Image (tube, rainbow, N blue to C red):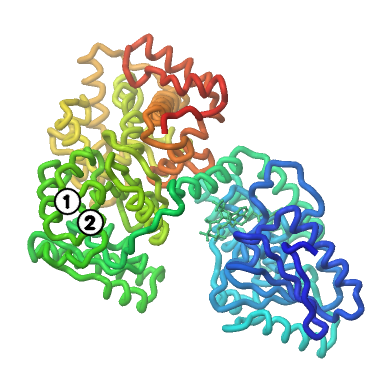
Amino acid sequence: MSSSVSIGNNNGVAVVTIDNPPVNALSFHVRELLMQALVSLRDEPSVAAIAITCAGRTFVAGADITEFGKPVRQPDLRALVAMLETIAKPTVAAIHGTALGGGLELALGCHFRVADTGAKLGLPEVKLGLLPGGGGTVRLPRLVGPLKALSMIVSGTPIVAAEALADGLVDAVFDGDLIAQAVSIAADMVAKGGPFTPVRDRNDRLDQANLPAFDKQAAALSKKARGLEAPIACAQSVRNALTLPFDEALAAERDLFVKLVAGDQSRAQRHLFFAERQAAKIAGKDVVRRKIARVGVIGAGTMGGGIAMAFANGGLPVTLLETTQEALQRGLTTIDKNYAVSAMRGSLSEDAKRQRLALFKGSTDYADLTDCDLIVEAVFEEMAVKKEVFGRLDAVAKPGAILATNTSYLDVNEIAASTSRPQDLLGMHFFSPANVMKLLEIVRADKTSPDVLATIADLARRIGKVPVVVGVCHGFVGNRMLAARGSELEPLLLEGATPRQVDQAFTDFGWPMGPFQMVDLAGLDIGWRNRKARGQTADIADTLCEQGHFGQKTGSGFYRYEDSSRTPLLNPEVEALIRDKAAGNGIAPRTIGTKEIIERTLYPMINEGAKILEEGIAARASDIDVVWVNGYGFPVGKGGPMFWASLEGVDKIIRRLDHWHQQTGKDVFRVAPLLRQMAETGSWDGAAG
Ligand code: 3H9
């Protein structure tokens, strides 16, 4: 038999091993061979029991995602699991690594499941815009109960082996030789004698009395779905397990799966799955990475503190540097408080909190950075200040240390040129709060060496970030496109829209918040400072700043905030200011619809994305999508701006941009040649990068 499925025999217990690197996905050839193997073992008198296990680093991590959207080739996963359940001999799944999606569904077809202590088990299909389509929604509740199944399936978050044991998902957890343990359990079951009940027939945890509690939890989870169909379908399907006979619930799960897998949302989320992995691949696989054992962070403010926490969360020791003892103490106290809050909320154990805090070393002396392999600067956003910092670093950092700037806008080439080692310098643009936000823009300067880029991309994944390499320009990928997105916001207000209406259009689209809420949260002063530095103005926002309205931190911005609450309230003064400014500019207010708000903000942003690709600032359109979904909350169900452009229709986008360009002459509406090419060829290829 082919090496992707092999059979061994251990005193009457057949051991079926799946070997389909890298993650043992259930591709067609694996399903076909597995089916043949199981049928032959079912009918083979000398085999008393069957154990299913995997070679390599993990148990089956799911169906093969690359097969979705193509015609299904039989046997499909459902047929495989149904076949497993016809076997009267005891069947045992031996789980190491991750049993995810179709992998866990396969294991649910077995009578017993045993796991390695380090194993994780889950049904993450929802993250791909799907629901478990191999019977997971109807079998899992039979083992762990409907409430637990609901939370696992709607969140998609895997649980660890110990939790799986406590919940009844696995029957035993072992350290050491897992296969030997699985064989031993199978042999014990043979000795004990059957019949063995398949999971489909275990109904004791499906108590109808749980329905009200279930519906309450499902309603709470659905509220958070923000327009995504998959979480709702997941909840519905688990409910079916509780209210319908097994076969009917299974058929309903299938129908929901078929609908979701063909839909735009799942296509978008699958696109993002591969886009994130693609973005993390830096050219030059064979490049030798530098060793990063200790990190230095300069600046213990909000950004520096968050960056330091991000490294500590990834298990790296951090030296945190400030100019004064007081500033350092303030920064360390904030870090302490942040971890205390996580511990209080239960997302971090007391032990883990202590371990993380033990990784911090504070200092006010640059000489203490000499043992750092990477030093990240997070000081005030001004070129002169940055240059001074790097001048000092140049003098103390050890040879080969990587130097990084966390600038959001400044020219990284200019910063690199101010050191004697530009090949070791790059940008690491974290997003606030840096310990939470997943995006890391890695800014490649002209002289950054390939091994520095590759080292930082690997490090980013090690600390749980999603890295994207970008080139040098004002604002890199994210903030440059953010400026394009914002270019029509004030004109929209002057023409008659309100901040609330614009924000509502954004949240209806699926953004977590609208642009005016966002600017109130971040502080209007940040954009004001930026505009002043570039000689730009914004009629309304500048006036608000001149009057001291910086947003949430001052209790008023585009909205009002009462008693340090974060709830945005209508601000009649701002509405009056807008009407005043409009009158001053001779603009008569008109009714502006949601569609116009979305088009005038998102189309220029896509156009800017095309320009960014032309210039080689981003290497792929999918990299831009990864930036926007992970750094700015672009709705995952729409796949990022460049993916969404295709859904929206590139022709239509161009027509509108051309029209606005003719009307206003604004550069932001000048259609990028690559956007026109995209309309003709359906591909973003041909970008400079
Ligand atoms: C499902 O099961 C549906 C069923 O309910 C119903 C069916 C009818 N397929 O992430 P990594 C590739 S839906 C194809 O870098 P890690 C990945 O693209 C599925 N390919 O490694 C990458 O390729 P490359 C439910 C897959 O160690 C390589 O493997 N399951 C799949 O950081 C390494 O991946 C999931 O959603 C796949 N299923 O993380 C689990 N998975 O090297 C999805 C991975 O060419 N997978 N690849 O770039 C994961 O979460 C992570 O890959 C895992 C390993 C945690 C397993």
Label 2 is placed on what type of residue? Gly
The percent position of residue 598, horizontal first and vertical second, equals: 44, 28
The percent position of residue 622, horizontal first and vertical second, equals: 48, 39
In front of the other: 551 or 605: 605
The percent position of residue 339, horizontal first and vertical second, equals: 30, 68
Q: Which residue is mark 1?
A: 379
Q: Are marks 1 and 2 in contact (CB under 8 Å)?
A: yes
Q: Secondary structure at mark 1?
A: loop
Q: Residue at x 59, y 79 (%)?
A: 166
In front of the other: 214 or 349: 349
Q: Which residue is mark 2?
A: 304
Residue 584, placed above or below residue 102: above
| Quadrant location, the N terminus | bottom right
Report the side of 435 relative to 127 (left or right): left
**Which label belongs to residue 195?**
none
Please indicate, yes or no, whether residue 97 appears anywhere in the rendered image: yes
Report the side of 286 relative to 152 (left or right): left
Please indicate, yes or no, whether residue 562 appears anywhere in the rendered image: no
Quadrant of the displayed image that contains ligand 1: bottom right
